[in-house]
Each structure stands twice: as structure tokens, then as C-alpha cells.
Image: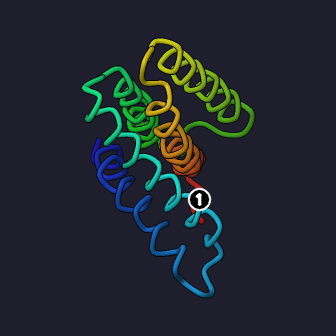
Amino acid sequence: MGSALWLILALPMWFAGLVRAAFSPDDGFKIWGMITVASAIAFVIGVVIATIRKNWRPFGMAISFLLSFVVVGVAGLLRGKIHGELVATILWTLTALQLLIVACTLYLSRGARAATALLIPLCGSFWMFAGLIATMSFEDTWL
């Protein structure tokens, strides 16, 4: 239980560390960090647009973030107990679910599709990072 809670609490801090990597001259995660910075800027713009228009439908993307935290938490609970193809199957299935959430949120946000579209890159980047952390936890193999 402690491992799951620790991973859930560490996930946002590690993800924010990618921003630092974008400005580091010799970090191997520089490109991912630059993508994270660009998607965070787009996210802020999307939130501002949705707030100005008083359209709250784009915030349905929060489900995507919550699913990322749930997957990392479950991976923390099952740390080192799942290996190989089963991990890939779980993560690909959850990636399909993430895409379905994004598509449904985009479809349902009539009048605010531009704002919703600006939220998608950060959700995707966060999901990929959470998937990386979950994979390492499931297999108990850390970079």
C-alpha cells in the first residue's frame, strides 16, 4: 500500500521534472521535456478559453488524469508481480480507453472543442509518462 501511495504522490513531481529537463543541456529527456512545456502552455490556454466562455465540458478531460493516477496506483500495489506481455496488454487496453475518453470528451464539448483540443496534448503526455512509471512498477525494473 505504501508503494502505491508513494508512486501516486511522486508521479506529478516526476512529470514536472520533465519541464526542468527541457532546459537542461545534456538531459536525455530534453525532447519529452520540450513537448511537456508546449503541451502545458496549450493546456493553460485551453483552460482560459473554457473559463472565459463558461463552458465546463472540456474539464471532462480530468477523467484522463484520474485514470493515469489509478493505473500508477494499481501498478504500485502489484509492484513486481506482473511481467512481459501481460503488462503490454494492460497498458495498450488502457491506452485505448484513454483515447476513447479523449474522443468522447471532444465530441461532447460542443461549443468548446478548441479549448478541449488544447487540453489533449498534456493529457496524452501525462498518460505516456504514467504508462512508463506503471510499466517499471509492474515489472519492478527501474531506469
Q: Nearer the viewer, residue 79 or 45?
A: 45
Quadrant in which residue 67 is drawn: top left
View extreme (bottom): residue: 25
Please tell me which residue is depicted at 46% across the width and 68% down the height of the picture. Answer: 19
Mark 1 is on which residue type? Ile
Please tell me which residue is depicted at 31% across the width and 52% down the height of the picture. Answer: 6
Q: Is residue 35 left or right of residue 86?
A: left
Q: Is residue 93 left or right of residue 22?
A: right
Q: Nearer the viewer, residue 10 or 28?
A: 28
Please tell me which residue is depicted at 35% across the width and 61% down the height of the picture. Answer: 13
**x and y percentages locating residue 134 in the rendered image:** 52, 44
Please tell me which residue is depicted at 42% across the width and 18% down the height of the picture. Answer: 111
In the rendered image, the quadrant that contains the N terminus is top left
In the rendered view, tell whether residue 80 sits above or below residue 57: below
Under tag 1, what secondary structure?
helix
Q: Is residue 83 left or right of residue 17?
A: right
How many numbered markers are drawn? 1
**x and y percentages locating residue 91 in the rendered image:** 62, 32
Quadrant in which residue 128 is drawn: top right
**x and y percentages locating residue 2 in the rendered image:** 28, 48
Q: Nearer the viewer, residue 1 or 112?
A: 112
**x and y percentages locating residue 92 in the rendered image:** 67, 29
View extreme (right): residue: 85
Task: Tell me the colour scheme of the image.
Answer: rainbow
Identify the residue position indicated by label 1 in the image.
Answer: 35
Q: Nearer the viewer, residue 3 or 64?
A: 64
In the rendered image, the quadrant that contains the C terminus is bottom right
Give neighbour class at mark 1: few <14, some 14-19, many 20+ (Cα, 10 Å). some
In the rendered view, tell whether residue 61 sits above or below residue 27: above
